[in-house]
Amino acid sequence: MVKTLLNKILSFVVRARYGDLTIDVRYYYRHTYYCQLKQLKYVVKDYVTKEKYKRLSFQGEFAPELQFVLPFAYWHYKNGTLLSTESSKYTRELYFFSPDHQESFETRSNEGNFNFEMPRILYSQDYDIEKWLPVPLKETYANPVYQFEKPILIIANRYNMEWDGPPVSFYSMELLEFIVGKLKNDYTIIYNRPKPHNITMDNSDIYDMDEYEWLARVHPDVILMEDLFKENKGKANNFNHLQLMVYANASKFISIHGGTATLASYFGGTNLILSKKGPEHHFHCFENLYPKFSGAKILHAKTDDEVKNFVEAYFVKR
């Protein structure tokens, strides 16, 4: 009853402040206010008594975890109030600072995204987040193992179900041919499209592009992240750990929106993100949120042609 009334009040506030909004984004505005109100009950614990009390638990998707949960946990760690964290498997290395981290969940879920104990969830009209600190993943996982003669360029691709339909944003083999052909002489290119058994799955099916065989045949100098994991010279505990180690030594990234792009944005340098549609566009996430993770320069391409233009302008060495 109270929650229903509160939702009506917040909906009125949103409408009064922002006018009529389309249904696909309207509730995110309300969620932002709801998250902010939930944080009010922790004012004394967070700013006055400052005892270790915060138990964070999250079972949502990879992108919102990196965007909002991990920086929130790190803020509590630096604030002296973090007691424990709980998330999906293969996340211990992300929460390296946590005094007690449990990998409790075998799968991620869309329902898990709507955890209003966080200062934001999913998308927001306000990314000026008070209890939020960028996590120094690059400084933590930089290493002497994954270093090469030429600077590293990570191509972080995905080919997944999107919005219960076929893939929308992905680097096709035609586009990969353009990128690799333009850049392989100047960079050590590492191609990364994780297979299902190496990551914690959510509700999106992963499809096969058959690009691994093509890359091995046409561009054998491109290194597959899968092969680096098989060799595991850095003694990574899991595939996510390996990604952190390799990404930490790179400063050039070409990625796809979602968790793929969010992770790449944690490591500075330049990150070209292909995102053809999604609420990220309405909320200007790539301009207002993604640069906060590490100060990286974010380039948002909405089409394949824009990808090519950004590659020519920001990646090709003159």
Image (tube, rainbow, N blue to C red):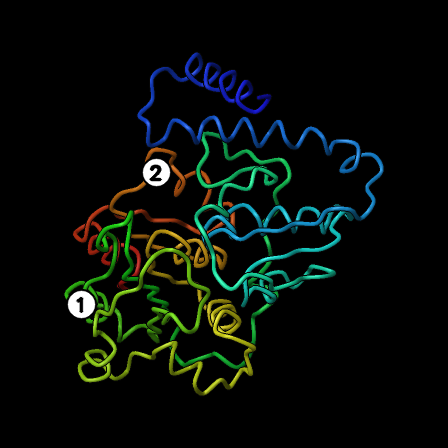
Left or right: where 76 falls relative to 199: right
Q: Which residue is identified by label 2?
A: 279
Q: Is residue 281 above or below residue 62?
A: above
Left or right: where 181 falls relative to 77: left
Which residue occupies 24% across, 46% down? 276
Secondary element under disc 1, as helix, strand or loop, is helix
Q: Is residue 24 above or below residue 274?
A: above
Q: In terms of image quadrants, where is residue 139?
A: bottom right
Q: Amino acid at mark 1?
A: Met
Marks 2 and 1: which is nearer the front?
A: 2
Q: Residues within 10 Å of mark 2 (few under 14, many from 20)?
A: some
Residue 21 locus on image (x, y percent): 33, 22
Q: Which residue is identified by label 1?
A: 173
Instruction: Specify which label sits upstream in the sequence, 2 or 1.
Output: 1
Q: Nearer the viewer, residue 290 or 158?
A: 158
Q: Quadrant of the N terminus?
A: top right
Which residue occupies 51% across, 22% down? 7
Residue 110 locus on image (x, y percent): 43, 48
Which residue occupies 78% across, 48% down? 80
Q: Nearer the viewer, residue 75 or 312?
A: 75
Q: Amino acid at mark 2?
A: Pro
Cα–Cα gap, marks 2 and 1: 26 Å
